Image: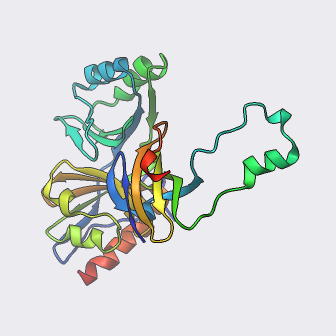
Amino acid sequence: MFLINCPFCGERDQSEFSSGGEAHIVRPKQPTELSDDEWAEYLFMRKNIKGIQFERWNHAHGCRKWFNVVRDTSNDKILSVYKMGEKPPVNYK
Amino acid sequence: MLDILHPKISNINKNNIDINLSEEKIKINIRGKNKEFFTKVGKILSIILPSETNTSSSNENYDVLWLSPDEWMIYFDENKNTNIFDQLYKDISTLNVGSITDISSQLICINIKGENIFELLSSGSPFNFEKFKNNVGSSTQTLVNHIDVILHHKSKNNVNLFVRRSFSEHLYEWLVDSSNFI
């Protein structure tokens, strides 16, 4: 269990949120031009790293807004929180 | 089996906690972002929508709760102005300025009063009530006993709890049971 600082509601318990998986995955502009492997790569393949990961979270039991989180998966430490559409913080890349 | 309008809730007083079903209230969910939306709502309700997180605005007729940056809930007693929904719907929804939804039948309002109410709520909620209990007018959406609720700190140690009708009887039973252990 850990606390997440919702950019709209403030610090709340993790149980109020639901994870939306890896962030910043861009949908291909021309899906019809992709091979099956490339499409499967976009659709299913996700990083599952031990370390700093960029994720989407939804405050499902609060304001119901989506936002991005930079989380260290090795210790569940939230390093940064930023709104949808904002650029990810460069110091964690 | 739930009644059409009210769940089976009777008034309870245990350990300085009063739990009772609030009289039937009209609840309206409003959503919008632009300047025209804020102007129209302000004019119709004579109230400024709260823009600060987890707060509310009130006047003699209405209470407006902040739900998210572009969403609020208005609630008021059923015997007050009943055509306010029609007015809002006509001026906002039909002109695509925002969205107005009557959610009166969706939510039940349980009123909880007393010195120990925050101990009771804390026992089944991940929310930190420290700031909430010191600020009359605070509102929040959180979980109580794993059930989604909207809480409004109406006056000192007096909280209106809004819960989906289908969960209301179960939550009421949990509140009554848990109040024995405070």
Residue at horizontal 38 percent and vertical 22 percent from the top = B34
Camera-nearest residue between A48 and A61: A48
The answer to whether residue A6 is visible is: yes
Q: Position of residue B182 (x, y in %)?
A: 23, 80
> Please, which colouring scheme is shown?
rainbow
Q: Residue furthest right?
A: A35
Q: Position of residue B178 (x, y in %)?
A: 31, 78
Would residue B166 appear left or right of B159 to someone viewing this image? right
Tell me where residue A78 sits by quadrant. Answer: bottom left
Q: Position of residue A20 (x, y in %)?
A: 57, 54
Q: Residue furthest bottom?
A: B181
Residue at horizontal 23 percent and vertical 57 percent from the top = B159
Would residue B64 appear left or right of A28 to someone viewing this image? left
Camera-nearest residue between A90 and B155: A90
Would residue B119 appear left or right of A44 to someone viewing this image? left
Q: Position of residue A28 (x, y in %)?
A: 72, 36
